[in-house]
């Protein structure tokens, strides 16, 4: 995966929708779901933090929308009450390493230890949480070595990627451009990446309400990601 995504990252324009050929190279990872699902899958990376995550949760509640939060273990440790609120309000949570490691720059043993450290933090804060939630994993930056992925999968993790990246964290992207990144590409079955982070909050606060309104107008459900049998490509 490293070589393929590295080549994609070198192109001058930003890749909002993950190319299908990359998705097909790694079918065991979750990229999107079937268009017949009538659901979209909003995901939020890098939280929880008090400056952004509670606002996201309030807005999701307003639209009766559910989402999947890929949490950094260190942030769960710092803000356990917000993490518990995520779970108590019916959202799914996943592992995003303990301190946002780049898999391409990290030895496999160190990477796995960091993931397990985050997992322990997540499960300690929410005892009895269904494994189908906590065993979801998204690699920070989308960068993970095949050796790391295989070992995580052997441990029972489902690696969740995406088919739409909003670039909400990118300061060179205007809020309106960020919105169009989503509205022009989102389809039933899409897995969409947002970030409940400092860097993303300006764009997120503009974009998320409009995306939720768009989803509502389409009569789609916002659903959580949980332990699917296999990745399903759209037609």
Image (spheres, rainbow, N blue to C red):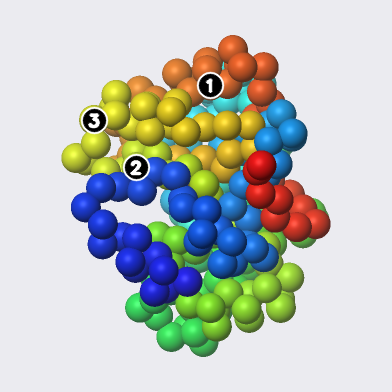
**Residue sitting nearer the eye, 88 or 37:** 37
Helix, strand or loop for disc 1? helix
Q: Which quadrant of the figure has residue 208?
A: top left
Q: Residues within 10 Å of mark 3 (few under 14, many from 20)?
A: some
Q: Residue at x 27, y 43 (%)?
A: 170
In the picture of the structure, the residue carrying the numbered disc 2 is 167
Q: Specify which label sits upstream in the sequence, 1 or 2.
A: 2
Q: Secondary structure at mark 2?
A: loop
Residue 195 in the image, given as x and y percentages of width and height: 42, 43
Tell me: 8 left or right of 152. Answer: left
Decide which of 117, 216 is in the foreground and name it.
216
Residue at 52% in and 47% down: 163
87 relative position to 144: left or right: right
Q: Which residue is mark 1?
A: 212
Question: Residue at 65% of width from left, 43% of height from top?
Answer: 234
Residue visible at 66% across and 49% down in the picture = 233
Labelled pair 1, 3 in contact (Cβ < 8 Å):
no
Give the residue at the far top of this rendering: 217
Marks 1 and 2, how far apart at CA: 17 Å
Residue, disc 3: 174
The one nearer the camera, 34 or 178, is 34
**Horizontal and vertical percent for residue 206?**
35, 23
Residue 233 is marked as none
Q: Earlier in the sequence, mark 3 or mark 2?
A: 2
């Amino acid at each position: 995966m490293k070589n393929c995504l590295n080549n994609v990252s070198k192109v001058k324009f930003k890749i909002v929708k993950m190319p299908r050929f990359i998705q097909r190279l790694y079918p065991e990872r979750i990229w999107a779901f079937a268009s017949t699902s009538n659901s979209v899958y909003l995901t939020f990376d890098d939280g929880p933090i008090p400056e952004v995550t509670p606002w996201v949760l309030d807005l999701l509640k307003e639209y009766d929308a559910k989402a999947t939060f890929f949490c950094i273990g260190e942030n769960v440790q710092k803000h356990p009450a917000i993490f518990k609120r995520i779970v108590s309000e019916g959202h799914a949570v996943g592992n995003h390493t303990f301190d946002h490691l780049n898999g391409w720059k990290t030895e496999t043993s160190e990477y796995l230890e960091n993931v397990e450290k985050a997992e322990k933090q997540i499960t300690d804060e929410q005892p009895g949480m269904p494994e189908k939630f906590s065993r979801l994993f998204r690699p920070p930056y989308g960068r993970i070595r095949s050796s790391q992925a295989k070992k995580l999968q052997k441990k029972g993790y489902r690696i969740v990627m995406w088919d739409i990246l909003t670039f909400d964290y990118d300061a060179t992207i205007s809020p309106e451009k960020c919105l169009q990144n989503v509205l022009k590409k989102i389809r039933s079955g899409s897995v969409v990446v947002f970030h409940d982070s400092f860097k993303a909050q300006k764009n997120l606060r503009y974009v998320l309400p409009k995306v939720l309104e768009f989803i509502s107008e389409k009569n789609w459900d916002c659903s959580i990601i949980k332990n699917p049998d296999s990745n399903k490509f759209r037609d």
